[in-house]
Image (cartoon, rainbow, N blue to C red):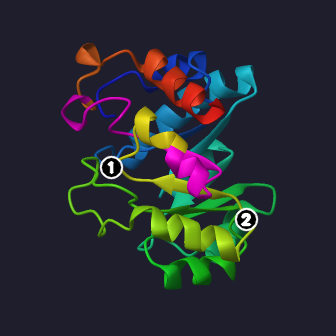
Amino acid sequence: MSNCAHDEIVRKMMAGGARLIQLRDKDASAKEILQAAIACLKVTRAAGATLIINDRVDVALTSNADGVHLGQEDLGVEEAREILGDDKIIGISTHTIDQFLAAMETSANYIAVGPVYPTASKENPAPVVGLDLVREARKISDRPIVAIGGITPERAREVIDAGADSVAVISSLYPYTEIRDFTTRPDITGRVRAFIDAKKD
């Protein structure tokens, strides 16, 4: 979300019903993402919502964000836990059953599984895992599972039915080509509300 008002996007997401938001900006510098985190935290804290930072444990620590989301190539969960403390939320993405099993051996608060469907939000995404990995993960764990990758409001219900507790979305809120152009963003509030409604159905 470089070159756009992150905190304004967060406000619109919360207006649609989002209560846990991940700040993810792969193109931003450490200084830029820290400034964005501080601005977004003012919005989420005022509304009682939760903000976690993608990848950047240092930014999560410095901004006093609510937690961090880690990828397979990022700092390990236990290393992040040692830095952030027991009261912070730590999530991790997994793309295979072996990675999921390994994540279960950590103190991760939730485990993300995917990509469930083809996704445009990553340049080199992991292979699509489909709903089967979500179902398999649900069978072996009662830890919160977040489904990621190519999820639309139309697909959200089947993902929840497969065993996911929640879904993480990027492309469905704004097409990948629009992420860096805040002026042409679509109706984020309406799109978030569509996901909330789909989960309730």
Decide: is 102 above or below 200. Answer: below
Asked which quadrant contains residue 181, the reply is: top left
Q: Quadrant of residue 185?
A: top left
Check residue 150 for magenta coloring: no
Q: Nearer the viewer, residue 10 or 142?
A: 142
- Calculate the distance from the C-alpha at mark 1 to the C-alpha at mark 2: 28 Å
Quadrant location of the C terminus? Answer: top right
Describe the element under mark 2 as helix, strand or loop. loop
If you read the primary sequence from the N terminus, does the residue marked by circle 1 or circle 2 appear first? 1
Q: Nearer the viewer, residue 90 or 62?
A: 90
Q: Which mark is residue 143?
A: 2
Q: Which residue is mark 1?
A: 26
Local crowd size for mark 2, using a 10 Å CA cut-off: few (<14), some (14–19), many (≥20): some
Do residues under tags 1 and 2 come within 8 Å of each other at their CB atoms? no
- What is the x, y in percent for residue 124? 22, 63
How far from the left and from the top, in percent, is residue 62?
Answer: 61, 48
Residue 93 seen anywhere in this rendered image of the structure? no
Using the rendered image of the protein, determine whether residue 154 is visible from the camera's viewpoint: yes
- Span highlighted in magenta in the image: 158-178
Towards the viewer: 140 or 104: 140
Secondary structure under the numbered disc 1 in the rendered image: loop
Indicate whether residue 170 is drawn in magenta: yes
Q: Amino acid at mark 1?
A: Lys
